[in-house]
């Protein structure tokens, strides 16, 4: 696991400071790779690298790494789990390629010589890499299928800058720090920024499952993979369970390959518990597990994590996240992300990774299980809504709706009040819109009421649901459930979950691996009939069946909680002063982005208990902290 960066000149002539700039870019992400550093430059390109040694701990893995004659150079971030298999399958040794290390990086560079950048489609792993081909004067950037590893770029004049984190690009003082107002608009809807845009105008992400080629003719993009849902209508439950179990086991076995200690982020949910159970089959000695909890019982899954730890005899360590710990990390944790980001699992993940630092270097994490196995409440809500729509509209709107809307606000995690109000609010929407309704933080109307006239002079907002509507429409799946899962896999997972997973682990120089994103497992689950994945309203039916007799019944039958913080309550009490420091009238007026009166109305409604604006206020707080840390300009 590493950090990469570099500069490419379309005109063929780097500036005199560009090699030094790449050195500064690499130092800016030293936390991603504390074990080694390197830079390479020629007339057209300069590459930088920071290394976290995981496979082949010797200096033979030093990067940037050339081929035998120095005509091709690579900087690589990630792990390729099938690199040994690819080396044999493509007979790289027989074809005369010389190997100086036992790294996956060196396999990549020789595979490129044989296949070109299309080799990305053969890789099983998580990766972001840059290959400089001196012969063709082309730079290739590539990113893995699920966006597990980040890669950003910016075209500035005749130069292309790229890096594992946005801070690399910001090392160039010539890159303006301008707020991308559309990205801000989208962030306020979801608490993260979807798509290829970033918070900074002109800085973008390489799309997931793509490679990009930069050369004299400009930039070309190529998609090398997409998830398809070629459902096998003849598949029965037994075959689905066996196929899923075998592929989960193989994915975990693959991702245990390392020359350093490996642990598990154990939440107490089914995904991470499954990882512990499968990992035990392929390891000796106690497994190191790391868990996070809260004082609020509705958010706390530590009792379940302890149950799994006892069953599998793991070496368990725990941290309880309190308002004081959150205060200690604000706003500094945003420096690892570089953008406004308000997923409530980020700070707990930071602290649980801090526990692991010094004991392990690699952590397995359960992200991707909900997308592959149909684990979200929204999937069950869609199924339930099909039944609920049979109730006459006058009964739904005239009798049921008033009762639901009168329920008092609850700050418990996934409370009945929250679920019923969200479910009812999505009843008359199209499936993808109803799906999004569960995740929308601020509506289009609420956001427009927040903006100052000055902001609205600078941009005409596009509806934030456009990414999801496009993905839903493009999906090759025939049924609604698979189409919803497709858009979550392509947007929610890479643009939200993987940000937290990558940045919070790399903040502690740890590598986080996600076995449930193994593309062979994901592709198999795409063939499973939807009625088996979601059995009535039973989410993750196939995973539950696959782990029967292995995991405790309490784990198999527990409701999904998810890692989240009780910020709705904290913002009313323990963290209220912090909220007012950043979102109070004086600070809001100084930035000129939001109307103080509209912001104050949100705060007062929340504090009084009339409405739960916890997610919205947590997002606005994070946005205002980001503005203070990065000092971006408007327009």
Image: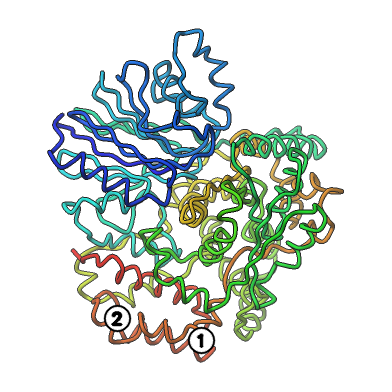
Vertical arrangement, residue 458 with respect to residue 100, above or below: below
- Report the Cα–Cα distance between label 2 and label 1: 19 Å
Image-based side of 552 in relation to 267, left or right: right
Total numbered badges shown on the rendered structure: 2
Q: Residue at x 48, y 49 (%)?
A: 494
Q: Vertically, is 576 above or below 53? A: below
Residue found at x 61% / y 76%: 397
Give the residue number, with chain letter if any, for mark 1. Answer: 572
Left or right of residue 538, residue 2 in this image: left
Residue 221: x and y in percent read 34, 33
Asked which quadrant contains residue 173, the reply is bottom left
Q: Are discs 2 and 1 less than 8 Å apart at CB? A: no
**Farthest-out residue, front:** 58
Quadrant position of residue 311: bottom right
Q: Position of residue 102 (x, y in %)?
A: 52, 25
Res 256 quadrant in image: top right
For label 1, the crowd category at 10 Å Cα-Cα, with few meaning under 14, some 14 to 19 and many 20 or more, is some
Q: State the colouring used for the structure image.
A: rainbow
Q: Is residue 333 above or below residue 202?
A: below
Q: Which residue is mark 2?
A: 588
Q: Residue at x 34, y 33 (%)?
A: 212
Closer to the chain start, of discs 2 and 1, is 1
Q: Position of residue 7 (x, y in %)?
A: 24, 39
Quadrant where the C terminus sits is bottom left
């Amino acid at each position: 696991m590493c950090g990469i960066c570099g500069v490419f000149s379309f005109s063929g002539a780097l500036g005199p400071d560009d090699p030094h700039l790449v050195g500064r870019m690499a130092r800016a992400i030293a936390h991603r790779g504390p074990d080694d550093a390197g830079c390479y430059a020629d007339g057209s390109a300069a590459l930088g690298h920071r290394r976290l040694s995981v496979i082949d701990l010797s200096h033979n893995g030093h990067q940037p790494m050339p081929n035998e004659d120095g005509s091709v150079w690579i900087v690589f971030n990630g792990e390729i789990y099938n690199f040994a298999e690819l080396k044999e399958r493509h007979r790289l040794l027989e074809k005369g390629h010389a190997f100086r290390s036992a790294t996956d990086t060196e396999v990549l560079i020789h595979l490129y010589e044989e296949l070109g950048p299309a080799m990305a489609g053969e890789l099983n792993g998580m990766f972001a890499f840059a290959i400089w081909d001196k012969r063709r004067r082309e730079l290739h950037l590539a990113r893995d299928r699920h966006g597990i590893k980040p890669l950003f770029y910016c075209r500035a004049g005749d130069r292309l800058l790229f890096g594992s984190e946005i801070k690399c690009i910001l090392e160039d003082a010539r890159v303006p720090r301008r707020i991308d107002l559309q990205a801000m608009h989208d962030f306020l809807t979801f608490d993260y920024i979807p798509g290829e845009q970033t918070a900074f105008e002109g800085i973008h992400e390489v799309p997931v499952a793509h490679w990009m080629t930069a050369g004299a003719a400009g930039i070309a993009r190529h998609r090398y993979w997409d998830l398809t849902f070629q459902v096998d209508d003849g598949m029965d439950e037994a075959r689905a369970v066996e196929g899923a179990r075998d592929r989960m086991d193989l994915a975990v076995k693959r991702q245990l390959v390392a020359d350093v200690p490996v642990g598990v982020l154990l939440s107490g949910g089914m995904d991470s518990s499954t990882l512990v159970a499968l990992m035990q089959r392929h390891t000796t000695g106690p497994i190191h597990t790391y868990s996070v909890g809260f004082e609020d019982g509705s958010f706390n899954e530590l009792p379940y994590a302890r149950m799994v730890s006892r069953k599998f005899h793991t070496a368990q360590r725990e941290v309880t996240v309190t308002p004081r710990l959150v205060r200690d990390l604000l706003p500094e944790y945003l420096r690892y992300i570089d953008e406004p980001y308000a997923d409530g699992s980020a700070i707990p993940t930071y602290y649980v990774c801090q526990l692991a630092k010094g004991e392990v270097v690699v952590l397995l994490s359960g992200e991707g299980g909900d997308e592959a196995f149909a684990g979200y409440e929204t999937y069950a809500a869609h199924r339930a809504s099909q039944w609920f729509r049979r109730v006459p509209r006058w009964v739904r709107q005239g009798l049921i709706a008033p009762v639901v809307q009168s329920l008092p606000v609850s700050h418990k995690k996934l409370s009945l009040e929250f679920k019923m109000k969200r479910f009812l609010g999505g009843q008359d929407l199209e499936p993808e819109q109803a799906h999004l309704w569960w995740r929308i933080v601020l509506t289009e109307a609420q956001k427009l009421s927040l903006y100052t006239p000055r902001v609205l002079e600078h941009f005409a907002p596009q509806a934030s649901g456009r990414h999801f509507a496009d993905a839903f429409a493009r999906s090759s799946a025939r049924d609604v459930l698979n189409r919803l899962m497709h858009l979550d896999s392509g947007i929610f997972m890479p643009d939200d979950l993987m940000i937290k997973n990558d940045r919070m682990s790399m903040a502690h120089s740890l590598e986080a691996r996600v076995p449930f994103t193994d593309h062979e497992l994901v592709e198999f689950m795409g063939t499973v009939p939807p009625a088996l994945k979601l059995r009535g309203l039973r989410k993750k039916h196939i995973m539950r069946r696959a782990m029967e007799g292995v995991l405790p019944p309490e784990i198999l039958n527990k409701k999904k909680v998810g890692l989240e913080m009780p910020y709705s309550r904290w913002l009313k009490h323990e963290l209220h002063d912090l909220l007012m420091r950043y979102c109070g009238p004086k600070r809001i007026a100084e930035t000129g982005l939001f109307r103080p009166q509209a912001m104050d109305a949100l705060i007062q409604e929340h504090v009084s208990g009339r409405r739960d604006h916890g997610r919205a206020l947590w997002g606005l707080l994070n946005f205002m902290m980001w503005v203070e840390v990065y000092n971006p300009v408007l327009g």
